[in-house]
Amino acid sequence: MPVRRTELTCPGHSLKMMAKAAASDADEVILDLEDACAASQKLEARRQVIEALRTLDFTHGKVRAYRVNGVDTAWCYRDVIDVLEAVGDKVDVVVLPKVRTAADVQFVDTLLTQVERACRLPVGRIRLEVLLETAASVLHAEAIALSSKRVASLIFGVADYAGDVGARDFRANQEALFYYPRAQLLAAARAAGVDAIDSVTVQFKDLAQVEADARHAAQLGFDGKWAIHPAQVPVINQVFTPTPAEIARARTLVDAYARADADAGLGAIDVDGEMVDAASLVLERKKLAVAERLGL
């Protein structure tokens, strides 16, 4: 699985914006055919996304993704078929919004398989990232996460979720107001062994707020966060990247525990006044895994 610290979304109708996103330091770029495109722009945006995937250089080996419209719209099936028949070999992920049940994911999974077979693409290579942004999707989070082997991550969509449940404002005090859906998403993602990605910070020019939101997400256990402007990417990347001190500390704890087990059969040890056991090493090993995948 690739590292997904930042997932930068950009409007599918603007080749200029997509080019800027492709050249950014985001781990993943999502070309958006859904909320970023008005109804009058949907068909032209689809053509622009095909052109972007065909011609742009997605630097740093980033994940190439695009977001289709929801399965209950008139555009979804053509978003899948037209784009993948044209440039399926250049797509790593399809992002599926407005999911309500596992059946929504399974429908798109079946459609992807049909396109892959028809186009002689490797079946199952194209992954799915699923947006949980409705009350129904949060309640069905575990079933959705386990609905397909293609699922690579669950993503929390705070704006649509707030609208669906009738919240009056989703910009302030997000930590308290939306703790439950985030915790539910995290538990489902971990149970399924997939990534958990936090929602956007809509105050895209307020980088201090972006950093605060990212740190809260990281503290909860999220693997990364959506970005809606290239300026947000360096801030989010920094928060979700283990520091040299954290990497060194993790290696010290893991190595000390291994030595204690081999030398004396100890299951819990004291390292600089801190009790270390198998449970406390889970987080340390995750830091080392992220660092290894980033080449640190």
Image (cartoon, helix red, strand yellow):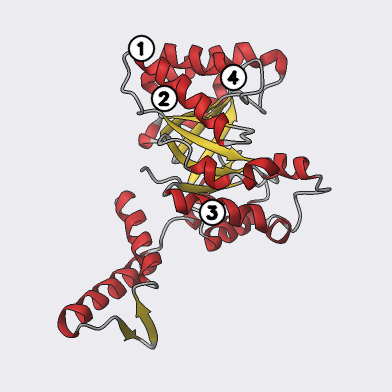
Cα distance, mark 3 to mark 2? 26 Å
Cα distance, mark 3 to mark 1? 35 Å
**Which residue shows up at 64% across the image and 33% down it?**
98
- Number of marks in the image? 4
Is 142 placed above or below 208 here? above
Q: What residue type is labelled 4?
A: Cys
Q: Earlier in the sequence, mark 3 or mark 4?
A: 4
Q: In this view, does 254 lie to the left or right of 138?
A: left
Residue bearing mark 1:
119
Q: Earlier in the sequence, mark 4 or mark 2?
A: 4
Question: Helix or strand or loop: what does disc 1 sit on?
Answer: loop
Q: Which amino acid does label 3 sit on?
A: Leu
Residue 218 at x, y = what percent? 52, 59
Residue bearing mark 2:
91
Q: In this view, does 168 lie to the left or right of 39?
A: right
Residue 156 at x, y = what percent? 60, 45
Q: Which amino acid does label 2 sit on?
A: Val
Q: Which of marks 1 and 2 is nearer the N terminus?
A: 2
Label 1 Cα crowd, 10 Å radius (few <14 / some 14-19 / many 20+) = some
Residue bearing mark 4:
76
